[in-house]
Amino acid sequence: MKYDKNHALLETSIPGLPSPKSGKVRDVFDLGDTLLMVVTDRISAFDVILPCGVPDKGKVLNQLSLFWLDFLGMKNHLVTADVDQYPAALQCVKDDLRGRSMLVKKVNMVEVECIARGYLTGSGWKEYQKSGTVNGQKLREGYQNASKLDEVLFTPTTKAAIGDHDEAINYAQTEALVGADTAKLLKDATIGLYTKAADYALKHGIIIADTKFEFGKDADGSLILADEVLTPDSSRFWPQSSYAVGANPPSLDKQFVRDWLDSIHFNHQPPGPVLPDDVIARTREIYVKAYEELSGKKLV
């Protein structure tokens, strides 16, 4: 395991196992019948992985995903997150894995990222200003930045390699990519899960403006909820107390890091700069706050 000076986990290694397949944040080990997903403390912004980590960020992402998997009740890929139940080959590093990992079933991932938008913001707001549309879907006139949409939008994208940007696709393109039946399953599941989560979060003082889901299919073709679920990395969380139409409220996610990078005129190209300790500390506070307010639990 490789930690930085703030004891943020940057790289995962397990004696006796091949190197993991690494994404921006997650390291995935193939254990044969199952996968071990380890959530590091790496942080990326503008599709650039920064050279420093944010302590406990991985634990927030992992434990919040576990909370939502249980709450949402949809069939999912989780086997267990109890490290004491992991295979013998993992017991030598179980203290490093505790709280930031899960053992999951292998599923055939659907190559579409499923985004639900309940509020008009970000790239959707920019498109709406130009053309009155979001992902090509025509909207009524009169929306402002951060307006609540009349209905939840399904705005899928294709999954991109690290360093590349996801590409927005419309519903017809989604049907062409995965088939009409699967496209409908994806849309219905995305909107249903978002609505259930957003209603819950609002009762806990947090607006989920938008979020991304990923799905797979198991051996019998059933749709499976997989990967991270409703985390600060995959969602836009707004404190209800600071929400007002016309401007984006401070987010409980990595927008704070993006804003700092823009303040130093970062060119959005690798290599990224090392974050100052105060920015790292504040980012950790934001992530932990999101977890504790949504789950009602203290971070383990």
Image (cartoon, grey):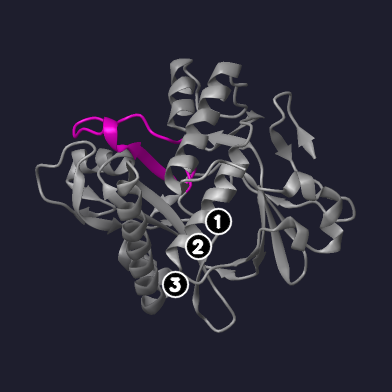
- Kindly state the secondary structure of the residue where label 3 is placed: helix
Q: Does the magenta stretch include residue 246?
A: yes
Describe residue 14's horizontal placement relative to residue 30 as left or right.
Answer: right
Q: Is residue 296 left or right of residue 148?
A: right
Residues at marks 1 and 3, CA–CA distance in whole angstroms? 27 Å
Label 3: how many Cα within 10 Å (few below 14, some 14–19, many 20+)? some
Q: Find disc 3 in the rendering and name its residue.
A: 178
Number of marks drawn: 3
Q: In this view, does 125 lie above or below 76?
A: above
Q: Residue at x 35, y 29 (%)?
A: 250
At 59% from the left and 49% from the top, the residue drawn is 62
User: Tags 1 and 2 in contact by the CB under 8 Å rule?
Assistant: yes
Q: Quadrant of the C terminus?
A: top right
Question: Which residue in the protein does label 2 denote?
Answer: 70
**Does the image show residue 118?**
yes
Question: Can you tell which quarter of the image residue 2 is in?
Answer: top right
Magenta portion: prevailing SS class: loop
Q: Is mark 1 on a helix, strand or loop?
A: helix
Which residue corresponds to mark 1?
Answer: 66
